[in-house]
Image (cartoon, rainbow, N blue to C red):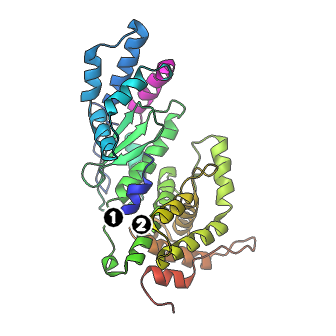
């Protein structure tokens, strides 16, 4: 799915043993591999104790599964001299000054309740879905996390961040695992017969998967999405959720432009990311609007009804409209809904 290749530029670990197989449906196979982080910590430890690094310690890093797959991912994006970049970073002052914090954070990863996070993600995937991933916590310079090879051997790389508490790590892990599961959605029947503009719009609607992942990571519609976060993140979320009506209108305008073919690929991508992450909006409208629609559907119609929309985000919009119309706000304010002609266009139909 083209959207996920772009969106999931945010984003895990394998212990020496795999997590226990879960008896739940869908089948869940998630493991954590910490070999890259362990090798990096050993290098930093040698620097601290002896002022130098043994050649064998560098070899251990280069041969670790986490580094080998990370290098493959970086090189697929055209990055050169990956080893040299890691060597420069690990021999710099910054990671050495944080050695104790990095050790603590890697230990937190090793004791993380992967099973609980996987169960939360699986609970918001359609029955029968297979959830499989290898999670790599990695010590590296850039503070981003991301997924790789979702269709063949799903991997999630997590930046080792000492500032994150275990509860936050578990929430993030559940969020990213939901993305991994969602990537396994089959294309809806008939989608390939729609005009190219409708197919592009379908891909962009996949951005609401961010809101679904927020709901899954929280564990339900009555748990605050930032229950494990600090007060700053909580306040930003509340501020942005309050802009729901305005954001629905902004998103609708974007989808209309995509359907009309008015945007170049570069323009489309640029506008798309304004709904994902900006300087003062770390979780954009795809997160907040997607979460609110999904939470309202689950509260009103139950989780089974919501799961029927997971693989076709067009149905998420239809289901939300139905719920919003049947459950007006008690304060008299009107919830924004999606225009009927837009919904018809997304399905390749003529407006009624």
Badge 2: residue crowd in 10 Å (few <14, some 14–19, many ≥20): many
Q: Is residue 294 above or below residue 90?
A: below
Q: Earlier in the sequence, mark 2 or mark 1?
A: 1
How far from the left and from the top, in percent, is residue 302? Answer: 49, 68
**Residue 111 part of the magenta segment:** yes
Front residue (pair 70, 318): 70
Q: Is residue 154 above or below residue 269?
A: above
How far from the left and from the top, in percent, is residue 207? Answer: 47, 62
Residue 185 is tagged as 1
User: What secondary structure characterizes most of the magenta part?
Assistant: helix
CA–CA distance between discs 2 and 1? Answer: 8 Å
Proximity of marks 2 and 1: CB atoms separated by less than 8 Å: yes
**Residue 131 part of the magenta segment:** no
Front residue (pair 222, 73): 73
Image: magenta residue range: 95-112
Q: Secondary structure at mark 1?
A: loop
Q: Quadrant of residue 157?
A: top left
How far from the left and from the top, in percent, is residue 186? Answer: 30, 67
Q: Residue at x 48, y 50 (%)?
A: 217
């Amino acid at each position: 799915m083209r959207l996920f290749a772009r969106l999931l530029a945010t984003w895990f670990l394998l212990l020496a043993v795999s997590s226990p197989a879960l008896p739940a449906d869908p089948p869940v196979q998630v493991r954590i591999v910490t070999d890259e982080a362990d090798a990096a910590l050993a290098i930093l430890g040698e620097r601290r104790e002896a002022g130098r690094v043994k050649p064998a310690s560098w070899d251990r890093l280069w041969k670790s599964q986490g580094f080998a797959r990370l290098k493959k991912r970086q090189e697929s994006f055209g990055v050169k001299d990956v080893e040299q970049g890691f060597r420069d970073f690990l021999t710099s002052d910054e990671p050495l000054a944080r050695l104790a914090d990095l050790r603590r954070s890697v230990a937190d990863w090793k004791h993380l309740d992967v099973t609980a996070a996987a169960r939360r993600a699986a609970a918001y995937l359609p029955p029968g879905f297979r959830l499989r991933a290898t999670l790599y916590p990695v010590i590296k310079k850039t503070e981003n996390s991301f997924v790789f090879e979702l269709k063949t051997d799903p991997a999630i790389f997590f930046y080792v961040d000492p500032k994150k508490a275990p509860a936050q790590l578990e929430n993030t892990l559940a969020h990213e695992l939901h993305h991994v599961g969602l990537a396994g959605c089959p294309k809806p029947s008939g989608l390939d017969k729609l005009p190219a503009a409708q197919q592009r719009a379908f891909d962009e609607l996949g951005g609401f998967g961010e809101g679904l992942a927020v709901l899954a990571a929280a564990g339900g519609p009555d748990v605050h999405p930032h229950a494990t976060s600090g007060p700053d993140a909580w306040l930003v979320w509340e501020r942005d959720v309050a802009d729901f009506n305005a954001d629905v209108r902004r998103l609708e305008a974007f989808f209309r432009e995509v359907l009309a073919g008015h945007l170049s690929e570069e323009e489309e991508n640029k506008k798309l990311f304004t709904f994902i992450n900006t300087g003062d909006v770390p979780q954009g409208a795809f997160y907040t609007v997607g979460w609110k629609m999904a939470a309202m559907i689950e509260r009103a119609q139950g989780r089974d009804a919501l799961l029927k929309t997971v693989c076709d985000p067009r149905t998420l919009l239809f289901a939300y409209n139905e719920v919003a119309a049947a459950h007006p706000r008690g304060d008299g304010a009107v919830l924004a809904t999606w225009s009927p002609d837009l919904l018809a266009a997304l399905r390749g139909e003529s407006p009624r």
